Image (cartoon, helix red, strand yellow):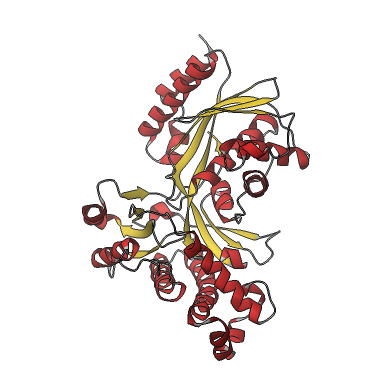
Amino acid sequence: MSNLMKTAEMIAAGAYDARFEKLYEDAKAARERFLHLTDMFKEQFGDGEDIRFFSAPGRTEVCGNHTDHNKGKVIAAAINLDAAACAAKTDNNVIYVKSENYPGDIIDLGVLTPVEKEREKSASLVRGVAARFKQLGYNIGGFNAVTVNSVLKGSGMSSSASYEVLIGTMLNYLYNDGRISPVMIAEIAQYAENEFFGKPCGLMDQMACSVGGFVKIDFADSKAPVIEHIDFDFASCGHSLCIVDTRADHADLTDEYASIRREMEAVAGVFGKTCLRETSERDVLDNIALIRDKLGERPVLRALHFYAENKRVDCEAKALSQGDFEKFKEITISSGLSSYTYNQNVFASSAPQSQPVALALAVSETVLSGRGAWRVHGGGFAGTIQAFVPNDLLCEYKKRLEAVFGEGACYVLKIRPVGGTEV
């Protein structure tokens, strides 16, 4: 019997269930998913190889809405949706990754510089991660892999970051005995997205996916962010995390997103600085008339959101560390109100008749007021909201939100304590 078939039998017999429960909670569903991965691998590469399994979670932003791009503070957390892979080492110096429902990417590791035709494609991320491993003196080598990804695209859960971290995790365990830290894997993933894929992203997404659990990140020094793991057992708090997809169109919102960073930086520019973290709230409060005259009112409001949100991150991290989930929910609601009224990223000013995120927040409040918490999730304007729902209200909440936004719009998630890992 081949190694692949032996592994499949072990999965079916429950040998991986303890690990599955830690990563996903539902061991039966995970068993079926990883058996599907072994079938994919056999179909793509045959059944004679010694296979291994890997996983990297998606993430949710918990606090710090639109602060990282101005060197602010954030709290993020890994979730139990992930990118998972079945892989085996090869000796041909080629990485071949076949993702479900996508063409395969074949990366010759003899070329570790950006390839123009790969820009904004998954192949660039694989090549970029391998290139950065090599630059930093780590081992690289060929492997065959098949992947599946349950992280929802366009949901603010960072499907691209989970994929980048997955590639880094495979190279880490296949060729470096797992000795590279999760923080370094995150930084490598960011490098690949910046330099090879061509997207100037920050580090929050990759860090949350790689480290796992709740993490607080301070971007005051963007080249060396301070990462603090927050020790909180979400499973014990009697709540579920819900992400509600309003299924609104993200098209033509690029300038709405960009305007937040642009206006925050413009306020900093009034003081001769490049970002708000280099200024103070007192600077802004003492010069509101001047800023208003130069830039208008909205940039002032967005700057005030930035300073208050940084304070909320500190308070929320403290609440979680002390096990005070009621305080955490109170701060979450405050963060959402600030995003709505000060940062103004709940609906697009260019299309005021379209307010799906605002509607989702309103419906959430009718169900959760006095019990749960709700806020805009991620970039805002369209897309998703986040809610922390008491378990005894979960069925009602899901029913009410899906009555508005359609069946399957409400995703019930858990905070995953483990980041990128070998399964």
Q: Which residue corresponds to the image point at 57% horizontal and 66% vertical from the top-left?
A: 73
> Is residue 380 at all visible to an observer of this figure?
yes
Nearer-the-camera pick, 289 or 219? 289
- Residue furthest top in the image: 1
Image position of 233 (left or right of 411): right
Q: Which residue corresponds to the image point at 44% horizontal and 35% vertical from the top-left?
A: 20
Image position of 5 (left or right of 111): left
Q: Which residue corresponds to the image point at 25% horizontal and 46% vertical from the top-left?
A: 407
Q: Which residue corresponds to the image point at 23% horizontal and 56% vertical from the top-left?
A: 404
Where 65 sits versus 195, above or below?
below
Report which quarter residue 27 is drawn in: top left
Where 234 sits versus 268, above or below?
above
> Residue 336: x, y in percent?
40, 69
> Residue 418: x, y in percent?
52, 45
Where 156 sits versus 349, above or below?
above
Report which quarter residue 348 is drawn in: bottom left
Where 401 sits versus 37, above or below?
below
Image position of 412 (left or right of 277): left
Count of labels in the image: 0
> Is residue 13 at all visible to an observer of this figure?
no
> Residue 373: x, y in percent?
35, 65
